[in-house]
């Protein structure tokens, strides 16, 4: 029995006592730390506290089956390998497992030596990928990958940290939608601006290239930390106070939040917005924020790069 010299943790998700006993014994003898969940929901609860190196996933379980669980895991942990370990051998089930986010598929009965080889292969591949992503970050190349739905498949550590700053708790679907709607424009040379929360800054997202049929690489420009409202005041012919309100509006703040930052009442904020909208040709908050972001980024949004360079 081969032993793992490094500290490896495996989450085993299976409702079969016999299977759990055999797998636990094999992994324990190999020096692997074992976590156990009896169904997909228990696995999700475990993953809120601990991120394992590999997940061994049965397919048919009560409460939440392995296919649904794998799909949910992929949304939270795009890089953790998932090895399906099931008695289902039909092609349709194998395809379903990979579509759900599985990295490998083993048909029961399980052979311990084969299982350990598969685990080692997956952990080595993941660590190499993480090292490569870390190297990109060290070169200030903040890269992430999305599918057509705008869902982030993976990101370098720094890119993920920056993306996390663009959203509030629980609104990842909003980011997915923005990326999905923007993707066709990104492919023809438009950039995307993402306001950062709790910071006077904006991220610029550039389209890099398509790597697979449904995988697209994007790059992030480090944020501009300080933005002077005078930029909006001069470019849009509005008052400085209106420019301050518009700047925070572009950062996704509500009227109440803007009022707290600028030490005025929400009613006054609304009044500034009503007076400003006709001046900048906007009829709602979304359009006003878009106009502001275009100005902040020098007009790059909504205009192809070749047009920008020809000016």
Image (cartoon, helix red, strand yellow):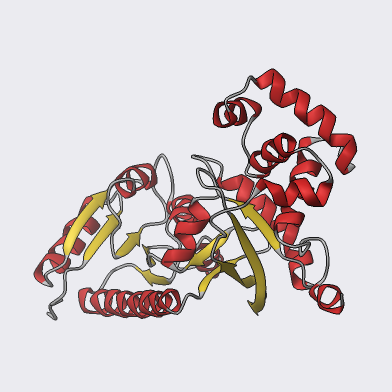
Q: Quadrant of residue 25?
A: bottom left
Q: The C terminus appears in which quarter of the rendering? A: bottom right
Q: In terms of depth relative to the viewer, which is nearer, 298 or 71? A: 298
Q: The N terminus appears in which quarter of the rendering? A: bottom left
**Seen in the image, is 243 located left or right of residue 252?**
right
Q: In terms of depth relative to the viewer, which is nearer, 190 or 187? A: 190
At 36% across and 80% down in the image, what residue appears? 128
Q: Is residue 237 above or below residue 264?
A: below
Q: Position of residue 252 (x, y in %)?
A: 63, 40
**Seen in the image, is 264 located left or right of residue 286?**
left
On the question of residue 149 being in view, the answer is no
At 62% across and 23% down in the image, what residue appears? 264
Q: Is residue 205 above or below residue 38?
A: below
Q: Is residue 4 above or below residue 23?
A: below
Q: In terms of depth relative to the viewer, which is nearer, 238 or 200? A: 238
Q: Quadrant of residue 31?
A: bottom left
Q: Position of residue 268 (x, y in %)?
A: 71, 21
**Seen in the image, is 131 located left or right of residue 293?**
left
Q: Quadrant of residue 106?
A: bottom left
Q: Position of residue 279 (x, y in %)?
A: 88, 39
On the question of residue 228 being in view, the answer is yes
Q: In terms of depth relative to the viewer, which is nearer, 171 or 257? A: 257
Q: Position of residue 91 (x, y in %)?
A: 54, 70
At 67% across and 39% down in the image, what residue appears? 244
How many numbered marks does the figure carry? 0
């Amino acid at each position: 029995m081969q032993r793992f010299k490094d500290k490896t943790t495996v989450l085993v998700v299976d409702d079969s006592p016999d299977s759990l006993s055999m797998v636990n014994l094999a992994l324990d003898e190999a020096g692997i730390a074992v976590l156990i969940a009896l169904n997909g929901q228990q696995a999700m609860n475990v993953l809120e506290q601990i991120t394992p190196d590999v997940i061994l996933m049965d397919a048919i379980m009560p409460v939440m089956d392995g296919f649904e669980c794998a799909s949910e895991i992929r949304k939270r942990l795009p890089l953790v390998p998932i090895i399906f370990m099931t008695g289902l051998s039909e092609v349709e089930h194998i395809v379903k497992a990979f579509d759900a986010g599985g990295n490998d598929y083993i048909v029961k009965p399980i052979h311990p030596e084969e299982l350990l080889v598969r685990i080692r292969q997956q952990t080595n591949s993941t660590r190499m990928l993480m090292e490569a992503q870390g190297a990109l970050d060290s070169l200030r190349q903040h890269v992430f990958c999305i599918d057509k739905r705008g869902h982030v498949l993976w990101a370098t550590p720094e890119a993920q940290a920056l993306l996390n700053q663009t959203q509030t708790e629980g609104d990842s679907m909003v980011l997915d939608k923005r990326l999905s709607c923007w993707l066709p424009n990104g492919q023809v040379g438009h950039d995307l601006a993402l306001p950062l929360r709790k910071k006077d800054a904006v991220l610029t997202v550039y389209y890099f290239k398509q790597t697979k049929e449904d995988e697209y690489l994007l790059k992030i420009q480090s944020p501009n930390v300080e933005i002077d409202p005078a930029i909006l005041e001069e470019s849009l012919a509005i008052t400085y106070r209106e420019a301050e309100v518009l700047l925070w509006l572009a950062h996704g703040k509500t009227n109440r939040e803007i009022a707290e930052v600028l030490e005025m009442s929400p009613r006054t904020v609304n009044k500034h917005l009503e007076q400003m909208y006709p001046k900048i040709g906007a009829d709602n908050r979304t359009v006003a924020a878009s106009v502001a972001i275009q100005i902040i980024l020098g007009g790059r949004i909504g205009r192809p790069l070749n047009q920008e360079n020809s000016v």
